[in-house]
Amino acid sequence: MRPLCCLVAAVGGSFGPGTLVSLADGSTKPVDAVSVGDAVHSWDAGRHREVEEAVERVWWSRGDLCRVQFGNRSVLATSDHPFWSVTQRALVSLTPEATKREYGFGTVELMGHGTRFLDVDGEEVPFMGAALAQANARVVTLAVRSHHWFFAGGILVHNKGGYSSSSRSSSSRSSSSSSGYAGGSSDF
């Protein structure tokens, strides 16, 4: 896949309908079926552990969707959506400047080849590429209470609509994780 989405800086969304969100009970639900109050599989960056967290807001907008390929998983997301990079130990997106503006993060790096991500099973998966899937599509956005992390399409992502001081200070799995996922950056 060619990284065509890197040229698309339209913001205003997050995920395409049908993108599976990991729930706290181990099941999944399409993002467009997630409701306020649903418990998602989240991450407490301050305590370095998996947690259950409630969705506090769901909204629809329009945005350009990219098909982002991670190993054998693909996610339909807007180019500005932030993902956690195990390799870079930072938030990354296809359009970092748009992500900084839209989310208010001080540092967001470019997602690229060689970048690895954390999946819902605690394994590292490689970024394989991205391509524009649909322009001006209906997209669904979630805000998750407190920890602001969840798994979309099986990949650890940050929500839209806020962050907590603990989600900016660090993020990691456990020290026993096979991925070695630990720490963050000073701006994260």
Image (cartoon, rainbow, N blue to C red):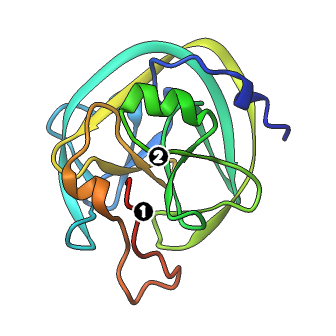
- The image quadrant where one finds the N terminus is top right
What is the three-letter code of the residue carrying label 1? Ser
Q: Quickly name the residue at label 2.
A: 107
Number of marks in the image?
2
Q: Residue 123, position in %: x, y?
A: 54, 73
Question: Local crowd at mark 1 within 10 Å, few (<14), some, or many (≥20)?
Answer: some
Q: CA distance from mark 2 to mark 1?
A: 9 Å
For numbered disc 2, what is the local secondary structure?
loop
Task: Name the residue: 51% across, 19% down.
Answer: 11
Q: Amino acid at mark 2?
A: Thr
Residue 151, horizontal then vertical, whole percent:
41, 52
* Residue 46, image x, y percentages: 21, 67
Q: Is residue 23 visible?
A: yes
Q: Nearer the viewer, residue 120 or 143?
A: 143
Q: Is residue 36 left or right of residue 61?
A: left
Q: In the picture shown, does residue 3 fall above or below 156?
A: above
Q: In the image, is 97 to the left or to the right of 22?
A: right
Left or right of residue 33: residue 114: right
Height in image: 123 above or below 14? below
Residue 16 position within the rendered picture, expressed as x and y whole percent measured from the top left? 52, 27
Can the viewer see residue 15 in this picture? Answer: no
| Residue at horizontal 54 percent and vertical 66 percent from the top | 86
Q: Is residue 157 above or below residue 31?
A: below
The C terminus sits in image quarter: bottom left
Mark 2, other Cα within 10 Å: few <14 / some 14–19 / many ≥20? some
Q: Which residue is mark 1?
A: 185
Tell whether label 1 touches label 2 (CB within 8 Å).
Answer: yes
Whichever of labels 2 and 1 marks the residue nearer the N terminus, that label is 2
Question: Considering depth in this image, is 98 or 133 the residue closer to the camera?
Answer: 98
List the single residue furthest toward the bottom. 176
